[in-house]
């Protein structure tokens, strides 16, 4: 609860704080006038959403829906605090959930009626064939009248989530003729007059041209060619015999002189020494040449400060629910972190800020030792920020510290800054409404939410107001650890919680001097920890 100094309090803050506390305690009868007064003086999402929650509990779903949609469409304005921002976020989800609960009415005439008017509780509704929302459980008087027909009236009451359709059939008045259904006169289609084509002129045909008879072509007699004279052939010319070509005797070359070759240079011999170590006769001793040994590379330079970021999440196994009761399910909590670390010898001191989203779908749960009638449907959309410090010991796996084994522990604190924890009484889905003998224990994962006390009928052993969960119906939000409503147990919604991880083990890979990748797992107070990230040396 936020306490405001009287000199700094704005108009309506006192009524808003009193109304919010009363709404959280389930005293909506007292909270509604306080919150309405606060809203009339100054609108704040943090007071409007609890007012809508109370309207939901009272059954005024249309009022609540209007407020949820108004708040959900708002943006953060100057002067809004964290509670206002959280209220805007929760209003979006609550508006969507409430839309499915609001019943609708459709009035469909079985035939067209001229001058048809439909009124509900004295108010005319436009386009009655479209769905119109109404509050559940409220008696509605539906009146319909048309020209030439008797007035029709009937009373109905809608239930939550009901989609009611009325087939409207009116009786004609005595002596009145049923007006025929007239159709609007059809407009004559303009037709174009036929286009008269001019008469075609006869085409003058030319008389056929008579061709003169062809004259026979005179053929010339074949010309007789004289016989060809034989061509005289010359006798072959005899070539004189070729004279032999005189060949020169081969020139004798003088024998080549052998080239004097130098004997191969012998490698220098070491000075022969006598058994006493003195050089041999005619030789001088040379000092031995010593080759320097290669120096091994030194260890990689240590970097003092690192900045890192990466994924950090938790896995909450169902067995953790079993420690406290029955039911539950496996939950994955995703998130991320920013970390700053400094090197202290072989240890890293890590300071981190992380985000975690504790989202859980509808899950059955009841405390240990409680009867089957105490099962509730629990859901969560909590979001948290965590700050922690860890001490990690680095164990190099090679000389250059390319790989290192890491082990350590951490301690911190978490704050659920946004979201709510929802609890709703539940009953077996296989039960038949109205037959209390069918409301027997069954598979809790098939249980459904109660709609109210003994709603559906016969569910009074499951849906009742006899215990600590008397008001745990749709729309109920669990108060925090630091809130204890009058006559009720302390709230269970975590607000500030400790965070501990022990042990944490991992592997570090450092491919470059200023860059490293880290993989780690561990056991924490919120489940099994897992993370993967990168670090850059500053």
Image (tube, rainbow, N blue to C red):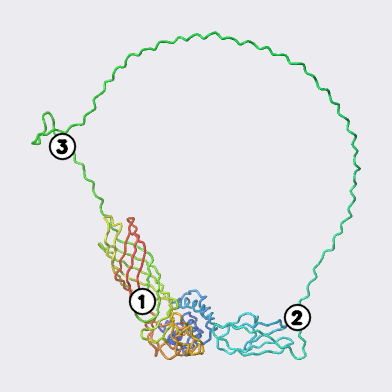
Residue at x 48% of width, y 74% of height: 76
Residue at x 37% of width, y 74% of height: 317
Q: Earlier in the sequence, mark 1 or mark 2?
A: 2
Residue 421 appears at what percent x and percent y?
42, 79
Query: Considering the numbered disc 3 on the image, is that residue within a helix, a strand or a loop?
Result: loop
Q: Earlier in the sequence, mark 3 or mark 1?
A: 3
Residue topped by disc 3 = 287
Q: Which mark is residue 464?
A: none
Spatial CA span between label 1 and label 2:
71 Å
User: Does residue 112 sit above or below 350 in this rendering?
Assistant: below
Query: Considering the numbered disc 1 on the image, is that residue within a helix, a strand or a loop?
Result: helix
Give yes or no for contact between labels 3 and 2 (Cβ–Cβ under 8 Å): no
Residue topped by disc 2 = 181
User: Does residue 278 sit above or below 454 in this rendering?
Assistant: above
Query: Considering the numbered disc 2 on the image, is that residue within a helix, a strand or a loop?
Result: loop
Q: Earlier in the sequence, mark 3 or mark 2?
A: 2
Residue 453 appears at what percent x and percent y?
48, 89
Quadrant location of residue 151?
bottom right
Q: Work out whether residue 537 or residue 60 is closer to the camera in this orientation and state it.
A: 60
Q: Quadrant of the N terminus?
A: bottom left
Report the side of 502 relative to 92 (left or right): left
Q: Work out whether residue 210 or residue 88 is closer to the camera in this orientation and state it.
A: 210
Residue 417 appears at what percent x and percent y?
40, 76
Quadrant location of residue 528?
bottom left
Quadrant location of residue 494?
bottom left
Spatial CA span between label 3 and label 1:
80 Å
Residue topped by disc 1 = 319
Residue at x 74% of width, y 90% of height: 173
């Amino acid at each position: 609860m936020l306490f405001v100094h009287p000199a700094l309090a704005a108009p309506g803050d006192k009524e808003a704080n009193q109304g919010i506390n009363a709404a959280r305690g389930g005293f909506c009868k007292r909270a509604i006038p306080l919150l309405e007064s606060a809203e009339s003086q100054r609108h704040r999402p943090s007071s409007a959403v609890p007012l809508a929650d109370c309207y939901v509990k009272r059954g005024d779903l249309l009022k609540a829906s209007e407020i949820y949609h108004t708040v959900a469409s708002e943006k953060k304005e100057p002067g809004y605090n964290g509670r206002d921002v959280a209220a805007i976020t929760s209003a979006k989800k609550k508006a969507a959930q409430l839309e499915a609960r609001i019943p609708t009415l459709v009035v469909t005439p079985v035939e067209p009626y001229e001058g048809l008017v439909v009124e509900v509780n004295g108010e005319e509704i436009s386009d009655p064939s479209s769905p119109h929302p109404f509050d559940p459980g409220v008696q509605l008087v539906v009146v319909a009248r048309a020209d030439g027909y008797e007035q029709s009236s009937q009373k109905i009451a809608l239930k939550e989530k009901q989609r009611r359709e009325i087939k409207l059939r009116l009786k004609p008045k005595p002596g009145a003729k049923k007006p025929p259904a007239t159709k609007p006169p059809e407009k004559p289609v303009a037709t174009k007059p036929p286009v008269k084509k001019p008469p075609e002129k006869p085409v003058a045909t030319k008389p056929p041209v008579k061709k003169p008879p062809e004259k026979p072509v005179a053929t010339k007699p074949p010309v007789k060619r004289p016989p060809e004279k034989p061509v005289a052939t010359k006798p072959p010319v005899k070539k004189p015999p070729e004279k032999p070509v005189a060949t020169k005797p081969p020139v004798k070359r003088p024998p080549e002189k052998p080239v004097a070759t130098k004997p191969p240079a012998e490698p220098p011999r070491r000075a022969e020494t006598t058994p006493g170590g003195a050089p041999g006769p005619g030789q001088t001793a040379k000092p031995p040449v010593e080759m320097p040994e290669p120096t091994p590379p030194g260890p990689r330079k240590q970097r003092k400060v690192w900045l890192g970021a990466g994924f950090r999440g938790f896995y909450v196994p169902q067995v953790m629910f079993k420690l406290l009761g029955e039911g539950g399910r496996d939950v994955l909590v995703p998130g991320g972190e920013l970390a700053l670390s400094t090197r202290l010898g072989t240890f890293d001191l890590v300071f981190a800020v992380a985000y975690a989203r504790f989202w859980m779908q509808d899950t059955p749960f009841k405390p240990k030792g409680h009867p089957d009638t105490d099962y509730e449907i629990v859901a969560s959309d909590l979001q948290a920020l965590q700050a922690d410090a860890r001490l990690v010991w680095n164990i190099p796996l090679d000389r250059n510290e390319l790989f290192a084994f890491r082990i350590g522990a951490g301690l911190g604190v978490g704050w659920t800054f946004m979201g709510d924890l929802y609890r709703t009484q539940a009953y077996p889905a296989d039960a038949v409404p109205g037959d209390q003998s069918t409301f027997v224990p069954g598979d809790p994962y098939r249980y459904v939410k109660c709609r109210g006390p003994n709603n559906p009928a016969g569910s009074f052993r499951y849906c009742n107001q006899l215990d600590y969960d008397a008001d745990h119906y749709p729309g109920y939000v669990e108060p925090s650890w630091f809130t204890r409503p009058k006559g009720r147990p302390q709230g269970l919604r975590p607000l500030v919680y400790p965070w501990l991880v022990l042990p944490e083990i991992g592997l570090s890979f450092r491919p470059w001097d200023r860059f490293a990748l880290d993989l780690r797992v561990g056991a924490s107070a919120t489940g099994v920890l897992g993370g993967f990230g990168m670090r850059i040396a500053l």
